[in-house]
């Protein structure tokens, strides 16, 4: 069976990334990127998802927002998009964009910018060059990728990274069969209880500062297009980094 493209998570620190991908192929006991999280002084807090997508994606973004808002520690709300150019980020929120980014090997990319261990802004890019093809232009593939990429911007990693393993019933799982219809298995279109539990662990403490909804001047973002690799970490200086998570096509 042809392997489906998947977005892989990016980590700050190559050693951490290598260790993560070396873990056994069953579901992780925990599946956080590491210590990276939005700074906030109360729970639940709200992450704004900027709607820069076309009408073909609006319903999938709305469903992803509603799914992740089931969490007891965070809510999301879809707001007017503020991205410019090639999905430039906006401080304190996540911008979600779609575009024909080209046949460069990836379906979607989730990126975060961090200061210390705090996420300060994020973007999700959905690649219509592939979603306009018959293979990926399906409700299942669109919902699956939208759900997973948004989930990455909260600090979540994958639960499993083997395409041919049975679906775990979560969008944070690699799969060749997003809705489970090809092989009569669980649907991977939405988060599962383990995702909500992991968010509870990530956000079990409160911070003395907040990075949600804040306006902070950031250095220019880098583009990830072109190179076939799974980890992109850009040092922006002053203790700030940009981290990209890419879901490659096979």
Image (cartoon, rainbow, N blue to C red):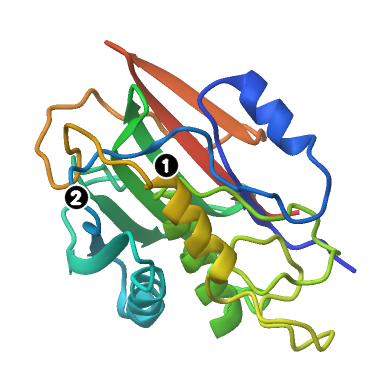
Q: Is residue 143 above or below residue 120?
A: below
Res. 138 in view:
no
**Percent position (x, y) of residue 210?**
17, 38
Q: Nearer the viewer, mark 1 or mark 2?
A: 2
Q: Is residue 224 left or right of residue 209?
A: right
Q: Relative to 169, say whether 18 is above or below.
A: above
Mark 2 nearby-residue class (10 Å; few <14, some 14–19, many ≥20): some
Give the image location of residue 7, x and y in percent.
60, 51
Residue that mark 1 sits on: 111
**Nearer the observer, 164 or 155:** 155
The residue indicated by pointer 2 is 42
For this orientation, the residue located farthest to the top is 238
Foreground residue among 19 and 138: 19
Q: Please tell me which residue is depicted at 63% across the width and 52% down the height of the picture.
A: 158
Identify the residue at image location x=58%, y=42%. 9
Q: Residue at x 24, y 55 (%)?
A: 43
Of 159 and 102, nearer the camera is 159
In the displayed structure, would residue 6 be above or below residue 185?
A: above
Spatial CA distance of label 1 from label 2 is: 24 Å
Instruction: Left or right? Give the position of 137 relative to 22.
Output: left
Secondary structure beneath disc 1? Answer: strand
Please state the horizontal and vertical placement of residue 226, each as a whole percent of the image. 57, 35
- In this orientation, does residue 220 appear? yes
Q: Secondary structure at mark 2?
A: loop
- Work out whether mark 1 precedes mark 2 in sequence or the reverse, and give the earlier one: 2
């Amino acid at each position: 069976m042809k392997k489906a493209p998947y977005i892989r998570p990016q980590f700050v620190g190559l050693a951490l990334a290598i260790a993560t991908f070396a873990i056994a192929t069953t579901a992780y006991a925990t599946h956080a990127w590491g210590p990276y999280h939005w700074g906030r002084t109360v729970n639940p807090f709200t992450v704004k998802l900027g709607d820069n997508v076309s009408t073909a994606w609006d319903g999938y973004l709305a469903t992803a927002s509603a799914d992740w808002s089931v969490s007891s520690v965070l809510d999301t709300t879809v707001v007017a998009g503020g991205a410019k150019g090639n999905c430039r980020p906006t401080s304190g929120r996540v911008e979600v964009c779609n575009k024909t980014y080209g046949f460069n090997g990836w379906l979607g990319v989730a990126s975060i910018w961090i200061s210390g261990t705090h996420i300060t802004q994020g973007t999700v890019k959905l690649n219509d060059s592939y979603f306009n093809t018959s293979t990926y232009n399906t409700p299942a593939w669109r919902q699956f990728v939208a759900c997973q990429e948004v989930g990455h911007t909260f600090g979540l990693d994958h639960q499993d990274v083997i395409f041919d393993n049975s679906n775990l019933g979560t969008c944070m799982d690699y799969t060749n069969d997003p809705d489970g219809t090809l092989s009569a298995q669980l649907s991977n279109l939405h988060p599962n209880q383990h995702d909500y539990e992991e968010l509870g662990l990530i956000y079990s403490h409160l911070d003395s500062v907040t990075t949600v909804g804040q306006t902070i001047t950031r250095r220019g973002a880098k583009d990830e297009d072109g190179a076939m690799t799974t980890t992109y970490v850009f040092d922006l200086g002053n203790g700030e980094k940009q981290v990209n998570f890419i879901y490659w096509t096979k």
